Amino acid sequence: MIKGYLGIDIGSISTKGVIIDENNNIICASYIWTEANPIEATKKLLENLKKELPNNVIIKGIGTTGSARSLIGLMVEASIVKNEITAHAIGTINKHPDVKTILEIGGQDSK
């Protein structure tokens, strides 16, 4: 069995999901419009990911970020709920440790 980790970024405009393995390799990913309904968007996102997920992957952890991170974190029983700034910083430093500046432009704000 492969250990997988699900990440969901639920924003006001779009909802993104990714499942990675223990080595941060992407197993599957999906990007959809939130359409002002984060719960339904998350259900659709999970359906999309499930269709692409190999049978030998077991989800060991779930993390959420984005404007509806707390709501969706409760819905999916997330292991961790973080704001976008933290998520961007950790993700970027893992892939590009020398980066000094990160720009994030979202549907509600820019950082």
Image (cartoon, rainbow, N blue to C red):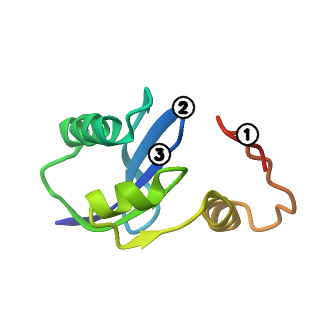
Task: Using the numbered discs, state the Cα–Cα distance from disc 3 to disc 1 in whole angstroms.
Answer: 14 Å
Name the image quarter holding the N terminus: bottom left
Of circles 2 and 1, the one toward us is 2
Q: Where is mark 2, residue-wise?
A: 13
Name the amino acid type tagged 2.
Answer: Ile
- Of the numbered discs 3 and 1, the one sitting upstream in the chain is 3
Q: Where is mark 1, residue-wise?
A: 105
Task: Using the numbered discs, state the Cα–Cα distance from disc 3 to disc 2 in whole angstroms.
Answer: 8 Å
Q: For the image shown, how many numbered marks are present on the structure?
A: 3
Residue 6 pos. (x, y %) = 35, 57
Q: Which numbered tag is attached to residue 10?
A: 3
Residue 5 pos. (x, y %) = 35, 63
Query: How many residues crowd around disc 3 within 10 Å: few (fewer than 14), some, or many (20 or more)?
Result: many
Taking the image as shown, residue 49 lies to the left or right of residue 98, namely: left
* Quadrant hosting residue 110: top right
Task: Using the numbered discs, state the Cα–Cα distance from disc 2 to disc 1 in whole angstroms.
Answer: 11 Å
In depth, the one of 24 and 12 nearer the eye is 12
The residue depicted at 43 percent of the width and 61 percent of the height is: 70
Taking the image as shown, residue 35 lies to the left or right of residue 43, namely: right
